[in-house]
Image (cartoon, rainbow, N blue to C red):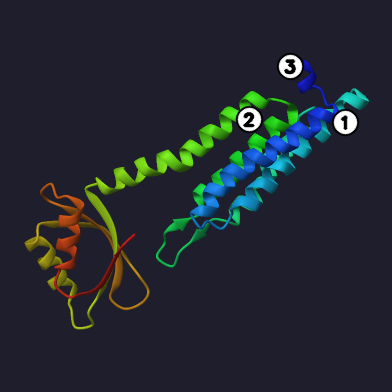
Amino acid sequence: MLELRALTSAAIVLRILLAVLAGGIIGLDRGLKQRAAGLRTYTLVCVGACMVMMTNQYVYQSYGNGDPVRMGAQVISGIGFLGAGTIIVTPRQRIRGLTTAAGLWASACIGLAIGIGLHEVAIVGSAAVLTALTLFRRWDDLIQRRSPNLEIYIELEPTCQMGDFFRSARRLELELSGLRKEQEGLAFIVTVRGRQRMVREELLGAVAALEGVQYWEVL
């Protein structure tokens, strides 16, 4: 086991191959979900972080001085520019790309662990990240489907008055809150909640039946 921790030629090959495998598996999942950062991006991040950590280990072992984790720390902070590039705010003020950014950061951390020889940490960490991106996604979708609140983008017909819209919502026993006006016409984002316990389908049906609604979309 100590030989695997040492920076030998065999250890270098093993670490880079493990980084390719770990980054590739995580990136494959993101690529199948049509995310901006996929197989190649995650693999490159993981392998790059691994190489940085091995270089830092080599410098420390060869010259006997310096900080053995200095370069790794720069990877952790520097990966932010790549993650920030995947985060966007849509015209309807929805944030997209946070999971991709977090995944890239985690992939870099996995690469650092592999680069220093902590194979156990890298393997368990990769499994944890993959679980969060797959299994937890299903749980997250289930939680959202059972949520009593819906955030909805609504466009009203040009002839509709806001007062008529709100009166229609009261008749259908809907509670509206957090209304945020959009720039174009009678368009806004609002949080909708049923006064009585409604399932998601009933709540969506009530929204579709609101007076004067020309277009609506769940955000």
In the image, is 159 to the left or to the right of 99?
Answer: left
| Marks 1,2: beta carbons within 8 A | no
State which tag comes first along the sequence, 1 or 3. Answer: 3
Name, please, the residue furthest toward the left. Answer: 171
Question: What is the CA distance from the residue labelled 2 to the residue labelled 3?
Answer: 15 Å
Q: Residues within 10 Å of mark 2 (few under 14, many from 20)?
A: many
Dot label at residue 122: 2
Q: Quadrant of residue 92?
A: bottom left
Q: Residues within 10 Å of mark 1 (few under 14, many from 20)?
A: some
In-front residue for pair 198/179: 198
Q: Nearer the viewer, mark 1 or mark 3?
A: 3
Amino acid on which the number 1 mark rests in the picture: Val
| Marks 1,3: beta carbons within 8 A | no
Pointer 1 residue:
59
Question: What is the CA distance from the residue labelled 1 to the residue labelled 2?
Answer: 22 Å
Pointer 3 residue:
1
Rendered view: 211 above or below 125: below
State which tag comes first along the sequence, 2 or 3. Answer: 3
Residue at 87% in and 24% down? 61
Q: Residues within 10 Å of mark 3 (few under 14, many from 20)?
A: few
The location of residue 200, given as percent across then percent down, is 20, 52
In-front residue for pair 121/67: 121
Amino acid on which the number 3 mark rests in the picture: Met
Name, please, the residue furthest toward the top. Answer: 2
Question: What is the CA distance from the residue labelled 1 to the residue labelled 3?
Answer: 22 Å
Residue at 65% in and 52% down? 40
The location of residue 65, given as percent across then percent down, is 88, 24
Dot label at residue 35: none
Q: Nearer the viewer, mark 2 or mark 3?
A: 3
Q: Quadrant of residue 205?
A: bottom left
Residue at 65% in and 39% down? 21
